[in-house]
Amino acid sequence: MEAGLTISSARAVASNLSLSSKCLDNLIAFPAPDLRWFSADEALFQEGDLASTLFEIAQGSVMVMRLLPDGRRQILDIARPGRFIGLTAGETHDCTAIALQHTAVHNHDREQILTAPRHGASIAAAMFDEIHRLRDLAVALGRKTALERLAGFLLAMTGNDHRSRIELFLPVSRLEIADHLGLAIETVCRNFTRMKRDGLILLEGNHRLTILDKEALKKIAAGHPTQDASKTARV
Amino acid sequence: MEAGLTISSARAVASNLSLSSKCLDNLIAFPAPDLRWFSADEALFQEGDLASTLFEIAQGSVMVMRLLPDGRRQILDIARPGRFIGLTAGETHDCTAIALQHTAVHNHDREQILTAPRHGASIAAAMFDEIHRLRDLAVALGRKTALERLAGFLLAMTGNDHRSRIELFLPVSRLEIADHLGLAIETVCRNFTRMKRDGLILLEGNHRLTILDKEALKKIAAGHPTQDASKTARV
DNA sequence: CGTCACTTTGATGACCCTCAATACGAGTGG
DNA sequence: CCACTCGTATTGAGGGTCATCAAAGTGACG
């Protein structure tokens, strides 16, 4: 692993996240699959590996990423329990998946699950979701500002929580957020600081964050032509 | 349509592209689907529309895009004959599809084709391809330079043509290339000019282009730490 | 031959990256 | 308990790539 990509053991700090209800549903839908544990920073699969199994996250979190020859990294997905990992077109994986915490996954045989009619529907839904997420990401990376990307990222991390004030556990470091959003780590920091200054969030340690004004974040993330608070504040 | 997005009638100039063999295969695999024609700039569907039909491009080309409230645009896909359009997770479309030329599409009933076992496999393959393309796009938008993105775009336009010298028809304007690659139109122009200066391509009118050195483009697009020609040339 | 849309080129500026220094937090050992 | 260390996060200064603004060039079409 490269020096710049080193990930601390701080990750083990809070690996006991809630096991989502969606995941429990899948435990019933897919009876008795193999369960396997990965430790933090361990690879579920690497780009180029044979794609014979499909992983379903039971507990923990996983990042899916691609590396350029000179070390530039794009994190394509940060996946939580209930999600499928390893959907690919060809015989081999086109990206790498790394566990972010101590993570449990169900192994499904790829051929078997794709041909089984009942399971096929779940996989199809997972693929549609994947397409939708990647479209969102492409719009963010191609056309949104750093602040808008970060707001969208935080909202994505909240999942379906509808409260206005939300306490979040971030399974990723600033560097990983940066590599997910196509930014430099310093830009992530500066915009977190700005959100904090503007009363949108609270920062409580590197992996804890509280959203104070979800509606404001939504407006920013949507790319609305908002009157910039930093400008009005200086009048 | 917005002023900035106006698209010229120049598109009709060369709408007689080759009807790919893959498309002919599909004509056999999916017997007697409805055929429908769209004129240039006509929408196949808009973001928010009910997603009841799946479109298979028979002839022409289509762009899939999303708009932000203030007019920023991200073109997510530029699709040629043989490709499926309208794959979406929910009941409604999460993006807009516009014909780039006079374009013929086959209409497939969404429910019917997804449940039919034989057709389902083709759709699954199409979805995998879509995921793969979107990952490539995200890596480009998030972590590649303007020159690298443009090189990758040109290679994607060549399809499976293995020759070194390739004459291309570009179904899109400079503005559309820019909105696909997350750049400004001027940046696209400048980098085309640079490629031309470096002997990588020829520019022959706004929609015609010849690739002279495909291998060099591949190296650039892959993100290899290349010795910059613009620097060495000035010594 | 004038208009119109698009493209190209140039000048300038903004946003974000890079480099650098400091701060913070957790773990370790004295 | 406190100094020390190490990795990460934050903040500041300066620079580069690309965006914006502006103007000229090109080609199609009436």
Image (cartoon, coloured by chain):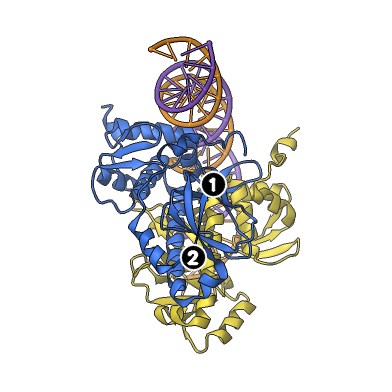
Chain colours: A blue, B yellow, C purple, D orange
Query: Residue A39 in the image: x percent, y percent?
Result: 52, 45
Query: Residue B217 in the image: x percent, y percent?
Result: 69, 53
Task: Report whether mark 1 lies on the same chain as mark 2.
Answer: no
Query: Residue A146 in the image: x percent, y percent?
Result: 42, 40
Q: Which mark is residue A74?
A: 1
Q: Describe residue A184's horizontal placement relative to residue D10 as left or right.
A: right
Residue A216 seen in the current view: yes
Residue type, numbered disc 1 = Gln
Residue highlighted by disc 2:
B63
Q: Nearer the viewer, residue B145 or B87?
A: B87
Judging from the image, mark 1 belongs to the subunit labelled A
* Residue located at (31% from left, 32% from top): A196
Query: Residue C19 in the image: x percent, y percent?
Result: 58, 24
Which of the two marks, 1 or 2, is nearer to us in this view?
1
* Count of residue discs: 2
* Residue located at (36% from left, 41% from top): A169
Compared with A6, C21 (above or below) is above
- Secondary structure under badge 1? strand
Judging from the image, mark 2 belongs to the subunit labelled B
* Residue located at (34% from left, 37% from top): A209
Compared with A138, A13 (above or below) is above
Q: Describe residue B202's horizontal placement relative to residue D8 as left or right.
A: right
Q: Which residue is most to the left?
A: A164
